[in-house]
Image: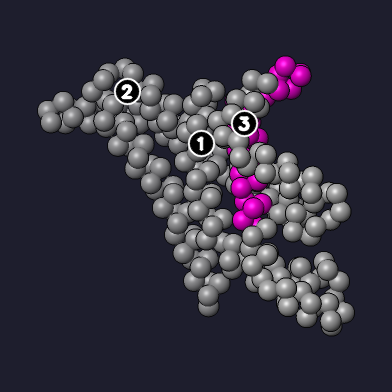
Amino acid sequence: MNIIAAGIFDAFTKNNVHYLLGGLGITVGVSIISVIGSLIFCSFIGIIIYEKIPFLSRYVSIINDVIRNLPLLLIIFFVYFVLPVIGIYLPVFWATVIAMTVFESTMLAEIIRGGLLAIPIGQTEGARSVGMTNQQALLNIILPQAIKKMIPPIISQLISLVKDTSLAVGIVLAEMTFRGQIIYAQNSNYTIPVFIALAIMYFILNYGLSLIARWFDHRMAA
């Protein structure tokens, strides 16, 4: 207990706290950009697969399934270590963002496809019977209903995205987990306090997303 008590105060010097908060900023930056990119791309992917466009939907579905079933860490390594072989060099920050956006887009696309399929086919048939095109039926009838079903699993997946940023430590992205390792490498007594601090910061980020999910749930139910 004495070791822990001493380490708690010694670990959080002004420089260490500033350094750790800098990692928090990088984690938040990667998360925000990846979330925005994922939501944009997953919408196109999910709708293309749902619409069953000849040839295109099948090929997109196959590629989506392949990427979705790969480990995220492998995709991060591919973007950072393999792309330079073909002349594409990316800073570690953007390599992480691209890898996470690609992976999360495929996961979210499956949620979108499932949400659209959950709407009874009668809704589409009814829209067509009053003269709507497929696109009009999708945008005005199907999608608004499907969004209510999609929001909770989408938020859950985005929470996973935030936690998965820690995998970028494998390519030395100086996010929270990496900087925490640097701090407790100075002194073994810092290990427990730093892990507690990391746990608190990840909890705050993810709990914030959970609150957003609940707010959306109440708004959609109203």
Label of residue 184 in the image: 2
Q: Considering only order in the chain, which callout, 2 or 3, is on the residue closer to the N terminus?
A: 3
- Residue 68 as seen in the image, left or right of residue 18: right
- Residue type at mark 1 is Thr
Q: Position of residue 103 (x, y in %)?
A: 62, 40
Any part of residue 72 in sight:
yes
Q: Is residue 147 above or below residue 182?
A: below
Residue type (three-letter) at the residue carrying disc 3: Ile
Residue designated by label 1: 165
Residue 201's spot in the image, x, y percent? 38, 42
Residue 198 on the magenta span = no
- Identify which amino acid the numbered label 2 is placed on: Tyr
Number of residues whose C-alpha sits closer than 10 Å to that of mark 3, classed few (under 14), some (14–19) or many (20 or more)? many
Res 195 → quadrant: top left
At horizontal 34% and vertical 43% (from top left) the residue drawn is 200
Quick one: 219 or 29, which is closer to the camera? 219
The correct choice, above or below, for 58 with respect to 151 in the image is above
Q: Nearer the viewer, mark 1 or mark 3?
A: 3
Q: Determine if residue 93 is in view.
A: no
Q: Residue at x 54, y 57 (%)?
A: 153
* 176 displayed left or right of 42: left
Q: Label 3 belongs to which residue?
A: 75
Q: Quadrant of residue 76?
A: top right
Q: Identify the main secondary structure in magenta.
A: helix
N-terminal-most mark, 1 or 2: 1
Provide the secondary structure element on which disc 3 rests. helix
N-term mark: 1 or 3: 3
Q: Which residues are magenta?
A: 83-112
Magenta stretch containing residue 100, yes or no? yes
Q: Residue at x 59, y 29 (%)?
A: 74
Q: Residue at x 30, y 37 (%)?
A: 196
In front: 20, or 211?
211
